[in-house]
Amino acid sequence: MVKVLDRLGVDVEFPPEQTCCGQPAFNSGYREDARAVAERFLIVFGNALKESRDEETYIVCPSGSCTAMLKVFYKELLATDPEQLNKLEIITKKTYEFSEFLINVMKTADVGARYDGVVTYHDSCHLLRELGVKDEPRRLIEAVRGIELREMELHDSCCGFGGTFSIKFPRVSVSMLDEKIDCIVGSGADTVVSSDMGCLMNIGGALSRRNIPVKVMHIAELLAQTGSERG
Amino acid sequence: MGYEKINFETDSGRAVDDEKLQRALVNVTNRFRSARQKASSEVPGWDELRTLGREIKKETIENLDRYLLMLEENVKKAGGQVHWARDGEEACAIIIGIARRNNVKSVVKSKSMATEEVELNTALEKAGIRAVETDLGEYIIQLAGEHPSHIIAPAVHKTKDDISRLFSEKLGVPYLSEPEELTKVARERMRSEFLNAGMGISGANFAVAETGTIVIVENEGNARLTTTVPRIHVALAGIEKIIPRYNDLSLFLTLLARSATGQKSSTYVSFITGPRRKTDKDGPEEFHLVLLDNGRSGILANEETRESLYCIRCGACLNNCPVYRKVGGHSYGWVYSGPIGAIINPQLLGIDKAPELPFASSLCGACRDVCPVRIDFPRVLLELRHEVKESKAEKGKGFELFIERISFRLWRTIVTHEKLYGAASTLMYYLLKPFRGKGGNLGSLPYPFSRWTQDRDFPAIASTPFRERWKKLKWEIGQGGPGKGIR
């Protein structure tokens, strides 16, 4: 993501105090723990925005799920605290998921990437259904030189990750994953791309276990390719 | 054939191994999904209709007390009788009471999830009253002594072969392989039941407050017979089935039929306002409406989860749920399944009876996208998860729960201190290093991560956390200036 943004002339900063958005605890019902983490997040990124003193400063996150936590679920988590909600509003206005940022803020689909391969895109549930981002990643992929985007069956169907769901009910999770893997393989693509590390970890874990030679890539990784990587 | 304890993990594990069930689930969910997809895309402004449906339901549920009294008044005006049942036991007692007063020995039933919820068949049987299901799916389920596994298609888990065997075993007919032949057998049996029954019991898809009308949608004509042939008709309806105005029906019948089966309208839609009138040629002499609470007023009282009561039982959330598609209806352990079951079973039964169900979802949100009244399932599930952890619902899980709590507290401490966070990343790298297998991935981890690695690998932790790499990266960017730094 840093490479791509840098290529586009964006000045990138990484607030070193940042850790996690708190989603694992929130999704598991531990709201008090999640709230402590969320409040800290708002301080860290609130400060980062203040320090930059530039109107054109954005928070960009390479994950549909974490972005959805911020933009959708923090409202729920912090609902009873008006002070936190004010802080949140300042931050959410500036926050974008990576592909959303490139298309809607940078107004760029072509980021100068090259990738010689057939790619299929897995919609991350949170990016697609919480944030409504569907076309942006596809436009970015299609603008990559040398690439072919081939939609899989059930491309918008959950891969079975679901955070702690994958450990609470592994049999069900893997059964959902099996279907996703069949769809990926069925598409004939040599690379599967998504916008969430959770999905990619899950899908990648199954591909590796089954020795299926399909590459797993985060969309930022794909967009960072210049064509020289494959030798 | 009562419901046993809910055990989602065990039952869902069994379900994913059942190849026959898996095939049946793929077939039925694919069929319903594409039918709904097509039917909803044919209606201009479908999503606006869903919004309108939600708004009407919201207003209705928030003024439920008023609408219920209006309904009662108008049912009475039409010559019907209204009964209030606090719980399942009361509902059964009321219905059995009506049967006894009229010396009814046998009843016919049309499909009703509410009667399933109160386990009416079991109660009738105990009271010495014969009850026969007349919806084909329910008839099959009743013969097999099972429970429905889908809100609108109760026998989806059964194959044609299962049914052929069941009929020949229970009905003493030869093995019939054609669905038409099987249907014919069922139809013949049912005809005599309809003619001999002293009472017909139905559910209600909608109850119109303004007119006292109950509306039943179906495709087989059995509900029409159930509600008109016997001398007495009893309808059992959850109190949330109410809609304010007769005019609202055009919207809700559209939303229901297209979301459920993808039909423009179901084959039969019956509008029942009171018993037969003097001018009517047929119809029942008595009409009773039993209004069932059974935990619903508890949901009403909970502002955060109240929208669970907007549900019109179309089943679209089941058909579009990737979890339901794998685990089927029985894994949810009680009457309702899929996303709607995951949110209302724990609320109707009490959260301590089904604390697993709010977690039986990957929170993918596909259900919300198809819900005709836009129930925000992920939000309600998250709220219920919170309630589970705040309550003593999981006290049976003592040690495991203790470990979980401690882990989250520890995690919280780590992620609220960036130095600890950095150190923990490095520690994880070294702790997990010995578990590396082929390609550097982790193939086998200790419990609880073994639950991940039993069927998939886990990626190795980066040797240098990003926050460390960033220092170098930033320097590189700085060297070249934006756009020229890193390659």
Image (cartoon, rainbow, N blue to C red):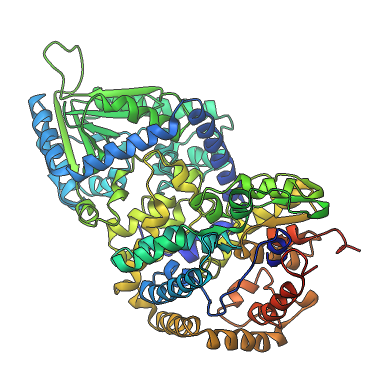
Classify residue B60 as left or right of residue B422: left
At which x and y percent is residue B132? 32, 36
Classify residue B352 as left or right of residue A166: left
Considering depth in this image, is B458 or A37 the residue closer to the camera?
A37
Residue furthest to the front in view is: A53
Classify residue B368 as left or right of residue A122: left
- Height in image: A184 above or below B163? below
Residue displayed at 36% across by 22% down: B268
Considering depth in this image, is B93 or A72 the residue closer to the camera?
A72
Considering depth in this image, is B364 or B474 the residue closer to the camera?
B474
Classify residue A215 as left or right of residue B419: right
At which x and y percent is residue A121? 69, 51
Q: Quadrant of the C terminus of chain B?
A: bottom right
How many numbered marks have been drawn onto this rendered protein structure?
A: 0
Residue B416 visible in the shown view: yes
Residue B102 visible in the shown view: no
- Height in image: B172 above or below B410? above
Residue furthest to the right in view is: A231
Residue displayed at 25% across by 29% down: B197
In which quarter of the view is residue B333 placed? bottom left
- Height in image: A2 above or below B446? above
At which x and y percent is residue B349? 28, 59
At which x and y percent is residue A147? 81, 48
Residue displayed at 61% across by 46% down: B23
Considering depth in this image, is A166 or B225 the residue closer to the camera?
A166
Residue displayed at 65% across by 72% down: B454
